[in-house]
Image (cartoon, grey):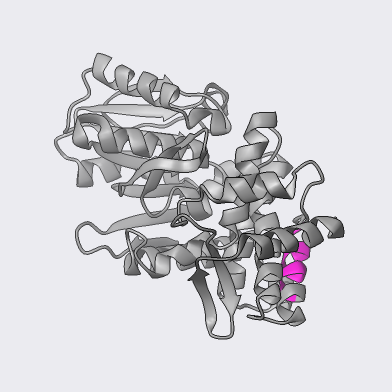
Amino acid sequence: MIFTVELEARPYDVVVEEGARFGLAALIAAKAPRAKSVAVVTSSSLAEQPWFDIASGLDQFTLFVPEGESAKTFSALEELLEAFAERRLSRDDVVVAVGGGAITDLVGFAAAVYLRGVSLVQIPTSLVGQVDAALGGKTGVNLRAGKNLVGAFYQPLGVLCDTSVLSTLAERERRSGLGEVAKCWLLENRDVESLRTSTLSELMEMAIGVKVALVALDEREGGSRVLLNYGHTLAHALEKLALRRGADELRHGEAVAVGLAFAARLARALGRVGDDVVERHDQVLRALDLEGRLPAQYAPEELLEAMTFDKKARHDLSFVLAGPEGYSLVSGLDRAVVGNVLEHFKGES
């Protein structure tokens, strides 16, 4: 499958197929013909995988960054930028990110700011990376205050989603990626029965299609692209608190699943939807074997405070919510109302 992100300034392809990584040399030759050096950025554990045979056809070197969300820090960014400079990477050269969503976020941001922009290719190796994180040009790192609060919109030359590497994912990583699939399924208002009979390939095609279409309409999130943040207000708050407890506490897709279930309940409390929408959200999450309940260790008051740092917020609480006319961003929500729904939601666990 090939999806084209139809951006006026620089459209690019998202290739989703077995062996997609082998298209790297041809992509660089076509899109960056003046390149002489290629920096492949990955983690040490991924470099040990049997499929790690990334070949650009040019003078190539590999740089290593930390695993998971530990990669999305200023210290990791600084080390990576210094390594680019030490290797004398030029504006004509190419940076290639090979890894999950955290690595593609970090490396994309590094490519955006090094020399004010060098060419980038994304090779996402996790399910969440292939259906969401590496697509659309959002890059960034975290602050202690919250996730993805520093970053840039920076589009790649292309995205190579090699589905063959997904077979090496741990089950938890695979299931985590389905959190973003659930989000897109709900945004599309697709029926639950079709979900239960869909293959992973079909689910990926659906989710990638949704994201590519919204990015093409609204590259810099000035309008409809904000819908892709559905479930993410609570999810990012959960991830912020989880990172304080340990890097392995919570995966992104797991947090998104909780955020989706909560968003449906908040919409119901505001009178925007009825019980049927809440039940449909729960059915979609169950069909994908996702746990849409708030873990007991997270206090509602802490989560409320963390949600005020969400990047969609304008000094208030903002959520993408379902409503009678579809999904939309709702701002200026009363903290007491949100807190009350959180308390009841925690009681369901």
Q: Quadrant of residue 120?
A: top left
Q: Position of residue 296 (x, y in %)?
A: 82, 45
Q: Position of residue 129 (x, y in %)?
A: 51, 47
Q: Position of residue 116 (x, y in %)?
A: 20, 35
Which of these two is toward me, 241 or 308? 308
| Quadrant into which the C terminus falls | bottom right
| Quadrant into which the N terminus falls | bottom left
Which of these two is toward me, 296 or 282? 296
Q: Quadrant of residue 277?
A: bottom right
* Outermost residue to the top: 86
Which of these two is toward me, 228 or 150? 150
Above or below residue 287? Residue 274 is below
Above or below residue 143? Residue 172 is below
Tell whether 326 sits left or right of 59. right
Above or below residue 192? Residue 129 is above
Residue at x 46% of width, y 57% of height:
312
Q: Position of residue 25 (x, y in %)?
A: 30, 38
Q: For residue 288: magenta? A: yes
**What kind of secondary structure does the magenta stretch mostly adopt?**
helix
* Outermost residue to the bottom: 324
Q: For residue 121: magenta? A: no
Residue 59 in view in this figure: yes
- Tell me where the magenta segment starts and ends, as one range: 280-289
Residue 236 in view in this figure: no
Residue at x 67% of width, y 65% of height:
337
Tell whether 68 sits left or right of 88. right
